[in-house]
Amino acid sequence: MIDVLDPRIHFAPNCASNSCPSIGVYIPDMIDQQLDLAARSFINADTVLDLKKSEISISRIFSWYAVDFGGKAGILQSLEKYLVLPERTYQYQATLSNLAL
């Protein structure tokens, strides 16, 4: 039984759709590291950041399961934690602040 939902679980399974994460074998003793890797890999593969237009495109998983991530604030935290930052961090932050779900 899971007491607290870990939103990284949404990056672990595979639903056989183009925008779904790939499936992996998860080992109990390494689950945190593996879920971090799954989140980082999925977010970086599926996120499009256009700094010129200050637009960001993210997976629909975030809107479908927004509550699991803690709403917009939690989604922003996940993106900030796992998305590889471009060189111009200030533009990145401005783009994220305009995120619409």
Image (cartoon, helix red, strand yellow):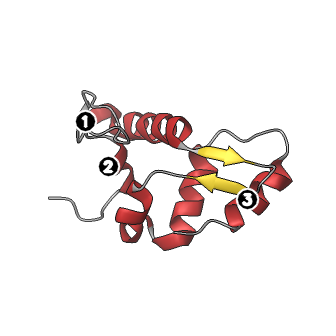
Mark 1 or 3, closer to the camera: 3
Q: Position of residue 64 (x, y in %)?
A: 35, 64
Mark 1 or mark 2, earlier in chain:
2
Q: Callout 1: few (<14), some (14-19), or many (20+) C-alpha neighbours within 10 Å?
A: few
Residue visible at 69% across and 67% down in the picture: 98
Mark 3 burial class by Cα count in 10 Å: few <14, some 14-19, many 20+: some
Residue furthest to the left in view is: 1
Chain-order first, disc 1 or disc 3: 1
Frontmost residue, 18 versus 4: 18
Indicate which disc residue 9 carries.
2
Q: Residue at x 83, y 38 (%)?
A: 87
Disc number at residue 95? 3
Picture quadrant where residue 31 is located:
top left
Q: Position of residue 43 (x, y in %)?
A: 51, 43
Helix, strand or loop at label 2? It is helix
Q: Give the structural element (helix, strand or loop) at label 1.
A: helix
Foreground mark, 2 or 3?
3
User: Between marks 2 and 3, how big is the CA–CA gap?
Assistant: 26 Å
Question: CA–CA distance between discs 1 and 2?
Answer: 13 Å
